[in-house]
Image (cartoon, helix red, strand yellow):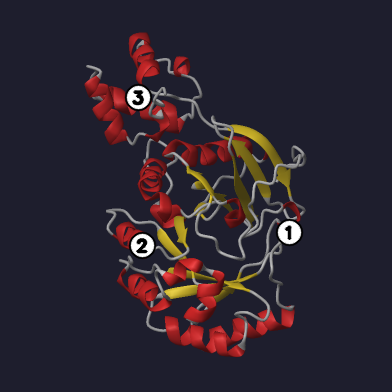
């Protein structure tokens, strides 16, 4: 079987430097290549005007620039926009653009499917098909930037969250490479303070993320206040129970004025009681954090329901009363299956969106 060529756009600038050195070229070629790949987002080697033809031909022999293609896009009534992107091997992934005032948050995927089987998440029902390459992660951002330039030239991506399809820390090395690429000043130049990596609670991955020289924000999907309930709705808890997960959160290095975000999906009759709200305050009281309360976003086949508005308000207020900064994450894009937990890559025909954001 023919071995797949490494993805050129997956290489950090340091690795590009090593590659051009191996090809007998001067080190400054790495910066040129990085600008073309990540600053301008070119799709073909021949578009790299100041790179010698001989180098381009050699790169074509030892690397691949094959990448994502836009398959479909949908526009929600609330302005949320979902992109379905197809990989070179025919897989589909989804990414979401969420406008909020003068901010624009992009939710990106790190895997095709997911192996961790959270019972309230549509992506989990796909199983894990494969990890995304670093190139396939960063290209989601480049597609979104190009789209905004066309339909809303006054808007730009201000925040990035690894909260789409897949568990980012289950694909740690490629996610870490994508973080380095997206932060670089010659590329997307996104501040690490504007990037959040969300995890269901892979403790070894949290520890590795904390050892990075430049760390993104950390979000943890907690979603329960007892191991009994979390074991049921998030099987990963059987490996890394709540006490161990919170120990990892306490040890995560935080810069001044930064907090860990705990995501809490409210499931009616499962984790939304007054006792849950009180326990949440006790569990998190000694951690510099904030809580995002997320009413469950229904999807076909899910065995759960969204609590009533009264129950949601009561839960949020009780957590606030416990002294935790607590925010309600209003469902966005649920009419196009783009809300939190709904990304599932259903292959029904998606219309190309019309009106601009």
Q: Dividing the image into 4 quarters, which one contains the N terminus?
A: top left
Q: Is residue 215 left or right of residue 117?
A: left
Give the secondary structure at mark 3. Answer: helix
Q: Is residue 102 visible?
A: no
**Residue at the location (45% across, 71% down)?**
237
Q: Is residue 75 left or right of residue 320?
A: right
- Sort mark 2 into few (<14), some (14-19) or many (20+) by Cα contacts within 10 Å: many
**Residue at the location (27% across, 26% down)?**
19
Question: According to the image, label 1 marks what residue?
Answer: 300
Give the secondary structure at mark 1. Answer: loop
Q: How many marks?
A: 3
Residue 153 at x, y = what percent?
Answer: 63, 39
CA gap between label 1 and label 2 equals 31 Å
Q: Is residue 30 left or right of residue 317?
A: left
Residue 206, disc: 2
Q: Is residue 59 visible?
A: yes
Residue 127 at x, y = what percent?
Answer: 56, 51
Which numbered mark, 3 or 2, is in the foreground of this view? 2
CA gap between label 3 and label 2 equals 34 Å
């Amino acid at each position: 079987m023919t071995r797949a060529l490494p993805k050129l756009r997956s290489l950090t600038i340091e690795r590009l430097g090593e590659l051009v050195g191996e090809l007998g070229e001067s080190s400054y070629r790495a910066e040129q290549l990085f600008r073309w790949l990540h600053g301008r987002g070119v799709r073909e080697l021949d578009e790299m005007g100041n790179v010698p033809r001989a180098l381009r031909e050699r790169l074509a022999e030892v690397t691949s620039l094959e990448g994502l293609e836009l398959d479909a896009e949908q526009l929600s009534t609330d302005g949320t926009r979902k992109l379905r992107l197809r990989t070179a091997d025919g897989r589909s992934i989804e990414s979401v653009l969420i406008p909020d005032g003068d901010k624009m948050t992009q939710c990106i995927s790190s895997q095709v499917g997911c192996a961790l089987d959270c019972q309230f998440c549509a992506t989990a029902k796909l199983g894990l098909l494969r990890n995304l390459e670093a190139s396939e992660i960063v290209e989601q951002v480049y597609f979104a930037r190009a789209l905004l330039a066309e339909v809303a030239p006054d808007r730009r991506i201000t925040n990035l969250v690894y909260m789409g399809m897949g568990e980012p820390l289950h694909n740690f090395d490629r996610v870490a490479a994508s973080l380095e690429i997206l932060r670089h000043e010659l590329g997307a130049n996104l501040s690490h303070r504007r990037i959040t990596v969300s995890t269901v609670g892979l403790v070894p991955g949290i520890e590795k993320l904390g050892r990075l020289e430049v760390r993104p924000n950390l979000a943890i999907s907690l979603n329960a206040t007892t191991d009994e309930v979390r074991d049921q709705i998030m099987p990963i808890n059987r490996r890394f129970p709540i006490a161990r997960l919170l120990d990892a959160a306490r040890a995560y290095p935080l810069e001044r004025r930064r907090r860990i975000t705990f995501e809490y999906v409210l499931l009616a009759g499962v984790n939304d009681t007054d006792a849950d709200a009180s326990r949440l305050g006790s569990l998190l009281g000694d951690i510099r954090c904030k809580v995002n309360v997320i009413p469950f976003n229904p999807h076909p086949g899910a065995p759960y329901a969204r609590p009533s508005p009264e129950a949601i308000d009561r839960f949020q207020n009780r957590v606030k009363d416990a002294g935790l900064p607590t925010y309600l994450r209003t469902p966005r894009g649920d009419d196009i299956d783009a809300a939190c937990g709904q990304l599932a890559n259903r292959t029904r025909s998606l219309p190309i969106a019309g009106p601009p954001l």
